Image (tube, rainbow, N blue to C red):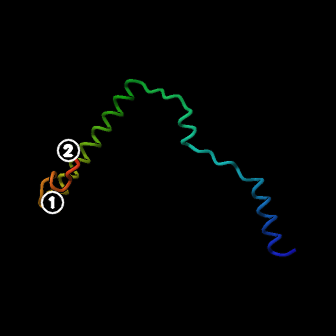
Amino acid sequence: MGNGAKASMKRDRNQKDAKVAKSQTKSTTKAPACVTSTLRDLILDWALRANILAMYSLLEHASNKHKKGSAECFPGVSA
């Protein structure tokens, strides 16, 4: 028995033992979307804070690195 046959046998054996990969995206879309009002408020609060921090970072970058205003550096972003 040559190496090719051994590799083929091993591949067949591993294929039988292999588990089927499950996509988290598919299982997430099938799950019911139950969000309480408290959780929704927390999520919105977190998103607002993240947006404020991102805007602050952009403004800081524009003033420190380029000595320009944010409108000149980032024309598509409204401050």
Q: Quadrant of the N terminus?
A: bottom right
Question: Percent x, y for residue 36?
Answer: 42, 24
Q: Is 51 rendered above or below residue 15? A: above
Q: Residue furthest bottom?
A: 2
Mark-to-mark CA distance, 1 and 2 = 19 Å
Question: Percent x, y for residue 76?
Answer: 23, 49
State the SS at label 1.
helix
Tell me the mark number nearer the camera, choosing from 1 and 2: 2
Residue at 79%, 58% (x, y): give it: 13
Q: Which residue carries the number 2 mark?
A: 78
Task: Inspect the image, locate mark 2, and give the three-letter code of the amino acid beneath it.
Answer: Ser
Q: In the shown orientation, is residue 37 left or right of residue 31?
A: left
Task: Inspect the image, locate mark 1, and give the three-letter code of the amino acid beneath it.
Answer: Asn
Q: Which residue carries the number 1 mark?
A: 64
State the SS at label 2.
loop
Q: Quadrant of the C terminus?
A: top left
Residue at 56%, 43% (x, y): give it: 24
Q: Label 1: how many residues lie within 10 Å, few (<14), some (14-19) or many (20+)? A: few
Residue at 75%, 58% (x, y): give it: 14
Q: Is 39 rendered above or below residue 46? A: above
Rendering quarter of residue 52: top left
Q: Is 15 rendered above or below residue 31? A: below
